[in-house]
Image (cartoon, coloured by chain):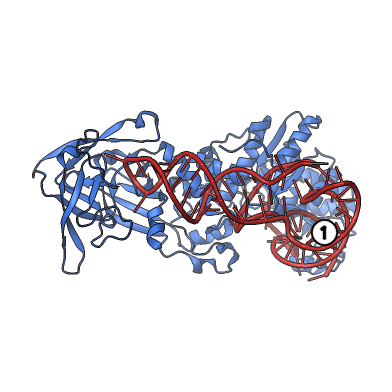
Chain colours: A blue, B red
Amino acid sequence: MIEEKGLNFIAEIIEEDLKNGKYKQIITRFPPEPNGYLHIGHASSINLNFGLTEKYGGYTNLRFDDTNPVTEEVEYVESIKEDVKWLGFHWKNELYASDYFETLYEYAVRLIKKGLAYVDDSSSEEIAALKGTPTEPGKNSPYRERTIEENLDLFERMKKGEFGDGAKTLRAKIDMAHSNMLMRDPVLYRIKHAHHHRTGDKWCIYPMYDFAHGQSDSIENVTHSICTLEFVPHRELYDWLIEKLEIYPSRQYEFARRNLTYTITSKRKLLQLVNEKHVEGWDDPRMTTISGMRRRGYTPESIRDFCTRIGVAKRENMVDMSLLEFCVREHLNKIAPRRMAVLDPVKLIITNYPENQSEEVQSENNPEEENAGGTRTVMFSRELWIEREDFMEVPAKKWFRLAPGALVRLKSAYIIQCNDFKKDGEGNIIEVHCTYLPESKSGNDTSGIRAKGTIHWVSVSHAAKAEVRLYDRLFTIENPGDEEDFTRFINPDSLQVIQEAYIETALTTAKAGDKFQFIRKGYFAVDKDSSPDHLIFNRTATLRDTWEKESRK
RNA sequence: UGGCCUAUAGUAUAAUGGUAGUACAACAGAUUUUGGUUCUGUCUGUCUUGGUUCGAAUCCAGGUAGGCCAACCA
């Protein structure tokens, strides 16, 4: 596991706050907007927010930032809850910004009464035009100097639904020449006659992010409100609103969102992949959504380990996908039972093994566990399926699998020697003929012979069939998120379906979510659509393959 | 070109004024009934120029590079 020392900068701030008595306990929140599924980037934020309160004492709320009814749906709320739970975290309270609409409205009235907010009749175009640019100051709205009474009256009528969408907004009265664009009289409330997933049609005015998020933090007494770097400029407004409203002073801290190579972590772009059917859905195993990774066979432990390893900082970053793969392999190596499956079969005939005979061999379930996790029985017979790539008519350098004359160990069974092979009219190998050494049986080997290579196999007469889906990275370039038309870089080979692979008997009772290592082929998980009649395995990750590297030389 | 944020091996992250470390990746070797796992070793780094200091990755100033900000999105 990872070393304890070397706190990230947020943990340092918290330790300092705790040490000097600023807080007795810390409260954080994970604040997703329910407008999409959670992805690996969110996992990082979840791991941070929940991890901090687990470590330092306190709690974390799950708060849905549901202030824009147009894009938010109950389906997303449900998926988010499921994903957070699956990752293994427990929130103290399930909350919604929409729970605070009444309070938020009162806060707005409070601001108006202080002369710090006004109703603006300008259109969004007019507001944008008067906003100025980063290098030029903005200009005051012609409605900026309305009286408090008039503002109060207008705001109440906005709430009552007297005006159409976009006709008016409530704006904070700060400074149109401020160097921070967000302080140039930001919009606090807008009119949207839209149905909200929780409040229904009760409201037709909705608070903007800046007038909901910090206030919700404050209402919940959140001590450390952790968000990503793009919200740094918002912090000034966050603090301004808390100060003027005279409410509990939550503090915002920002860290850099994590970027991963060969994938995208933008809800908008993920949604596009779903809508344009480049993938099967939000939980397509090629998606780096939490639900996609779950379906792919990732474990929550491996995702949490990954998040902890990549850490927290404020600089731009691009994390190597190989680290994620390392984390999942490391965990699966410890927990996944070993099984044999042949994905691209070629028939192997043991010419000196009696026809119609079969026997049981014992194979270890997991050499990484104490006592090898026990053994299982595998049926052995005269005809076996082996992997096409495990035979070479003309062996390469350093090749130590099957080739004419070569000796090889059949995993958990006998040593065999290749004597012959058959080809079809097109030159494809269709049969490999071998003889076996009867005294070389695993666990009982008196042959004194050592075979350099070991290959996996499945008995033809005992094999079951299964569909196997081989997944590869979804994109062909490291940073598809940088590309305007990122769909052009979708990997055409990101999914390869094997309709009929041969699997050993022990695999036939596998249920959705079960994880295995197919010896020498990789880690596989049973798909949610799998059934006893039609088993489906998803490849989670390949094994490290040093031969593949060697062969490329 | 105004404001803000950031800069340590290929990648990510430590070192909090005192020996630049860890992980992944890469490479080499040992072990292995998975070319897996495990073990050993190797390679590669403080953006730049000054300043403060006995001593600077760390503090200060200038420069350079990258990022963010002009939705009635979050």
Q: Is residue A286 left or right of residue B33?
A: right
Percent coordinates x, y for residue A49 in the rendering:
65, 40
| Residue A324 at x, y percent in the picture | 52, 49
Q: Quadrant of residue A31?
A: top right
Amino acid type shown at disc 1: Asn
Q: Residue beneath label 1, please?
A: A180
Which residue is pictured at 19% across the width and 38% down the height?
A447
Q: Position of residue A73 (x, y in %)?
A: 56, 50
Could you tell me residue A469's position as x and y percent? 36, 53
Q: Taking A464 as reference, is A154 above or below it?
A: below
What's the residue at 69%, 39% (across, down)?
A7
Taking the image as drawn, is residue A323 in sight? yes
Work out which residue is located at the far left of the displayed protein and give it. A355
> Left of A476 or right of it: where is A354?
left
A338 or A33: nearer the viewer? A338
Q: Is residue B20 above or below residue A427?
A: above
Q: Residue at x 27, y 54 (%)?
A: A390
Residue A160 visible within the image? no
Residue nearer the viewer, A516 or A67: A516
- Local packing at callout 1 (Cα closer than 10 Å; few below 14, some 14-19, many 20+) is some
Q: Quadrant of the C terminus of chain A?
A: bottom left
A131 or A392, which is in the foreground?
Answer: A392
Q: Residue at x 82, y 46 (%)?
A: A239
Please tell me in which quadrant of the rendered image residue A183 appears. Answer: bottom right
Chain bearing tag 1 is A
How many numbered discs, if any?
Answer: 1
